[in-house]
Image: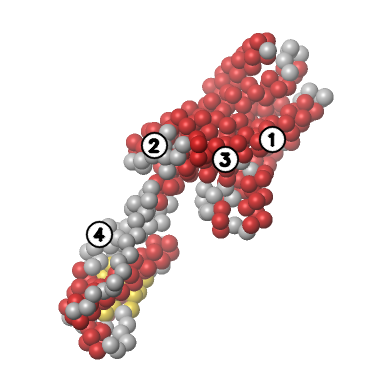
Amino acid sequence: MLDHLANIWRLTIKELRSIRADPIMLVLVVYAFTMNVYTVATGASVEATNLAVAVVDEDRSALSRRIADGLTPPLFRPAVEIAATEIDAWLDAGRVVFVLEIPPRFEADILAGRAATVQVNVDATAITQAGNGAAYLQTIVLNEVAAFRAGRDGTASGSIDVVVRAKFNPNLKSSWFTSVMQVVNSITMLTVILTGAALIREREQGTVEHLLVMPVVPSEIMLAKILANGLVTLVAAGLSLVLVVEWWLQVPISGSLLLFLAGAAVYVFTVAALGILLGTIANTMGQFGLLAIPVLLVTQLLSGSATPLESMPVWLRWLMWTISPTPHFVTFAQGVLYRGAGLSVLWLPLVAVAAIGGAYFAVALHRFRRVVFGA
């Protein structure tokens, strides 16, 4: 046993030196866990924030002024009043995203109980923010009209007051979600690429033949590659969570970072075995890249980090739970980092990741012995 551990230690040091001698790969690791996390978290915002809105007030009533005053930050900038003839020009010039047009006798129709309408003109170039902003705009108008009618009639707005509070992310900021999930995606991508590329590089350069004459066994070589490349990924992920997510993006981490890294170590073992398996199937670095792209896309898009697993068909959900470790690790990461859950709650996803990792490692070891050692 001591001889096996010594061999794994020496091979791990060799792998770490190989990573250090590859500046392009190191740049990729640094970029994936820094700028990539930051740009995804800040550049893919879907919430309505600081939207420009103009109001065409043809009613000039207390209700119309109340609606205009209700368009306040942070959802909207203070409303700008324009004439009806300026609507197209302002939208075409990109000065505003929304133009709210309140018709004449709007307040009188509301008080008389007649049907009343307002027109919302939307610049849908930014389709996501336009859709969300239009929904907020509709809610504000309805609330202001209901409050105005209740105040004029002297009646209460209702016997039940519903107050909605969002737990774990009170302001529903998308960066709190996307930044952490991007770290998880980077762990998956880089672990597969690093381990698979390490094997392909040795096969292309011919250094794998040196291993064949050494007193080492295939399992030691595989474990060394998993340990070395997994260690680089875990260190980069931990620093990314502390320096990029918590410090740079100001995203609070509720749970234990050590518990997350411990679970990530199990996950890294699993996806590293997957990377070696792909490396035994491909013969060149180009083939490995073409093979890894669809595998990574499927594991990430169907992992629950982009869309909820509940939105998938039942058969696809069970298939991903069975063959992919990523949905289980996403569940674990969200429980630890968002909700502050402990191991007593999240042990089952870790067991699932370990079980899938054992299956990946067994298949990869069989392929490794047959392809590299010819056994």
Identify the residue at image location x=34%, y=56%: 165
Name the residue tied to disc 2: 244
CA gap, disc 3 and disc 4:
41 Å
Instruction: Give the image location of residue 156, x and y in percent.
Output: 23, 75
Q: Amino acid at mark 1?
A: Tyr
Q: Secondary structure at mark 4?
A: loop
Residue 319 bears which disc, if any?
A: none
Identify the residue at image location x=39%, y=39%: 254
N-terminal-most mark, 3 or 4:
4
Is label 1 or label 3 in front? 3
Q: Amino acid at mark 2?
A: Val
Instruction: Give the image location of residue 197, x and y in percent.
Output: 63, 31
CA gap, disc 4 and disc 2:
27 Å
Q: Is residue 8 visible?
A: yes
CA gap, disc 3 and disc 2:
26 Å
Q: Which quadrant would the C terminus be assigned to in this image?
A: top right
Task: Indicate the quadrant where residue 200 lies.
Answer: top right
Name the residue tied to disc 1: 360
CA gap, disc 1 and disc 2:
32 Å
CA gap, disc 1 and disc 4:
51 Å
Pointers 3 and 4 in contact (C-beta within 8 Å): no
N-terminal-most mark, 1 or 3:
3
Q: Amino acid at mark 3?
A: Pro
CA gap, disc 1 and disc 3:
16 Å
Residue 349 bears which disc, if any?
A: 3
Identify the residue at image location x=38%, y=57%: 47
